[in-house]
Amino acid sequence: MNYLKDADPELYNILMREVVREKATLELIASENFVSYPVLEMAGGVMTNKYAEGYPGRRYYGGCEHVDEAENLARDRAKKLFNAEYVNVQPHSGSQANMAVLLTFLKTGDLIMGLDLAHGGHLTHGSPVNFSGKLFNVVSYQVDRKTGRVIFDEVRKLAKEHRPKLIICGGSAYPRFIEFQDFKNIADEIGAFLMADIAHPAGLIATGLHPSPMPFCDVVTTTTHKTLRGPRGGMIMMGKDMENPFGVVAPKSGRVKNMSELIDSMVMPGIQGGPLMHIIAAKAVAFGEALQPSFKVYTNQIVKNAQALADAFLKKDYHLVSGGTDTHVILIDLTNKGITGKAAELALEKAGITVNKNMVPFDERSPFVTSGIRIGTPAVTTRGLKEEQMLIICDLIDQIIVDPENDNIINHVNATVKELCYSFPLYDDLLN
Ligand code: DSN
């Protein structure tokens, strides 16, 4: 199909430049991945045309029979993947999934507790610049300066002192397993709800490579595009549905509603209108892929690659927050290398290696500068890179970090990056 090329060459050329960028650079942003052709096809398909406010079988519009089938499949496959009794696949993003959960379980002004953004948390876990910090009161927990891990004695102390109504576990730059059981113990001691945000390790959880939150958490949110390798979007799940404790009743029957009903109505009409049916259908395609045995082979390789990369960095005297990784994420504190995260990100980008600057725990620099970089292996693993190539990547990154302004080194590294990328091709069918 060359419709775009003929109709709008300006945008077609922009799209092709992005295809070339993705093909010819090493993508190490921990939250990014490359979807399959089937996911891409569904995400670019005609379901983008359909309005379908409501849920399967009870929509506000006619003509929903096929999008209903797609949404039902997405929900059923997600339930199977995560062993969840309830799933809502409509949130447009992880942030909207989190917003729907917080507004369902809490009243504005209630107290939440989440991991400090600078310690690996997420904007929606209580940052003052986000709705979560504006609508709710917040107390943040941190990681230990030495171990880089959550200190549960501290979390317990804070929880008992402030008595949050809801505790959030998970984050976007925490390289270790999320300790669901420890959080559950504390939530139970103070009678708080426990929410897990598994946006990062979702693919690892779906394949049993990371513990599951389902037995421990009241509610679980995720994105679908990171380790899960689906289209960009969000999702809300519960291991077990439960009767709502707030006394909300169904208007006609007087029956006490379940939390699933309250979450559904908070997603739509509460915070969203028409769902993105092309994306929901693409989520179903990705979940189908994740149910295949080959997906476990893939996620296993993500972790093996991250561990190989972490070990290689440690051998070159890099300081890894928490000393390594259990997952796909590596967080490097560059203080001993005399370079900021911002400078490292820029120099690496010139050489064709994409990472993001990232605050490290107790960072004295601003989020725009930072003392660290975050690296992740999901996208390069999708291309087929293995441990052997991780050693090469570590060496390339090190050459840049040691001498970030040396154009000869940047050019030399970029040549090796291109060779690697062409040996592990991506999206060849998209260039024409
Ligand atoms: N922006 C995502 C990440 O990079 O982890 C989190 O929302």
Image (cartoon, rainbow, N blue to C red):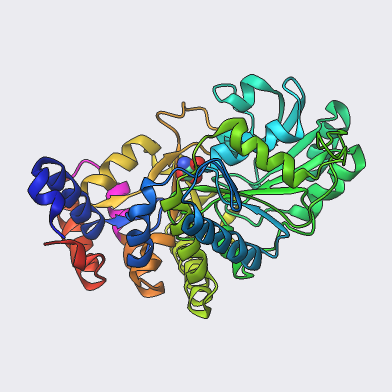
Question: For the magenta stretch, what is the residue range?
Answer: 396-406
Foreground pick, 30 / 124 = 124
Query: In the image, 83: left or right of 6?
Result: right
Foreground pick, 172 / 98 = 98
Q: Is residue 304 visible?
A: no
As drawn, the residue found furthest toward the bottom would be 293
Query: In the image, 67: left or right of 267?
Result: left
Q: Percent from the top left, x then y, of residue 185?
A: 86, 49
Picture quadrant of residue 385:
bottom left
Foreground pick, 59 / 345 = 59
Query: In the image, 401: left or right of 4?
Result: right
Q: Percent from the top left, x then y, of residue 360?
A: 53, 39
What is the chief secondary structure element of the magenta stretch? Answer: helix
The residue under the point 59% across, 25% down is 131
Q: Is residue 190 visible?
A: yes
Foreground pick, 260 / 193 = 260
The residue under the point 57% across, 53% down is 175
Q: Percent from the top left, x then y, of residue 182?
A: 80, 51
The residue under the point 22% across, 49% down is 18
The residue under the point 39% across, 43% down is 356
Residue 159 inside the magenta-drawn segment: no
